[in-house]
């Protein structure tokens, strides 16, 4: 029995090392390419990948913000495909930020890629249910897809979350809701 226990410890250590290697390989697929650093962090956090991801997200937060700012600049220059790429990089650096998804949704809307915009808007809402622009972007995506009732409903949800002092967004939502009503009326007349 005394001879078996040390051997079991070696076997267990070998299995643990193999597990960390596999987890580090998965982190590489997520874009965290420093495999040795990942293994070190996995050892430090007893194999808890979520804690390792938190560490990476904190580490790359500033870089993610730089990509977001680059995307914002590209949007102002009407370079929407490039903006999507920049926002995608920011999401890869920190997929927990609703603004990154909301901004990419805005770029997709400009490219008339409404399904992609809707997906990003929904992810943004899941991350931060109080992020108003996610509802506004969903409304714009639905409008582009000619789903006017869903668009109207999204703007209503945005209005419910808006502060009355946010006059710009409040007026924008009301204007878009009126457009939705006009389109819904036109659809019902043509039927």
Image (spheres, rainbow, N blue to C red):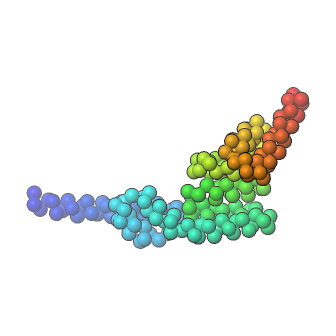
Q: Is residue 188 left or right of residue 140?
A: right
Residue at 18 percent across and 62 percent down: it is: 7
Q: Is residue 10 left or right of residue 1?
A: right
Residue 171 vs 187, above or below: the answer is: below
Res 39 → quadrant? bottom left
Q: Quick one: 99 or 146, which is closer to the camera?
A: 99
Res 159 → quadrant? top right
Residue 149 vs 65, above or below: the answer is: above
Residue at 67 percent across and 45 percent down: it is: 161
Quadrant location of the C terminus in the rendered image: top right
Q: Residue furthest left?
A: 2
Q: Is residue 55 left or right of residue 1?
A: right
Res 68 → quadrant? bottom right
Residue 182 seen in the figure: yes
Q: Quick one: 40 or 24, which is closer to the camera?
A: 40
Instruction: Tell me where residue 72 appears, x and y as whole percent.
Output: 72, 65
Residue 18 seen in the figure: no
Residue at 62 percent across and 67 percent down: it is: 65
């Amino acid at each position: 029995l005394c001879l078996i226990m040390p051997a079991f410890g070696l076997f267990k250590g070998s299995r643990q090392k193999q597990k960390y290697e596999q987890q580090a390989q998965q982190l590489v697929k997520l874009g965290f390419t420093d495999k040795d650093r990942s293994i070190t962090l996995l050892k430090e956090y007893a194999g808890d990948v979520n804690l390792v991801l938190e560490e990476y997200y904190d580490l790359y937060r500033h870089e993610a913000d730089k990509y977001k700012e680059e995307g914002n600049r590209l949007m102002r220059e009407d370079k929407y495909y490039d903006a999507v790429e920049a926002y995608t990089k920011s999401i890869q650096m920190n997929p927990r930020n609703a603004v990154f998804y909301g901004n990419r949704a805005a770029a997709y809307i400009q490219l008339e890629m409404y399904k992609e915009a809707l997906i990003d808007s929904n992810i943004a809402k899941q991350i931060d249910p109080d992020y108003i622009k996610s509802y506004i972007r969903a409304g714009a995506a639905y409008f582009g897809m000619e789903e006017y009732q869903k668009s109207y409903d999204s703007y209503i949800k945005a209005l419910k979350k808006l502060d009355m002092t946010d006059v710009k967004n409040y007026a924008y939502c009301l204007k878009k809701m009126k457009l939705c009503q006009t389109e819904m009326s036109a659809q019902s007349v043509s039927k």
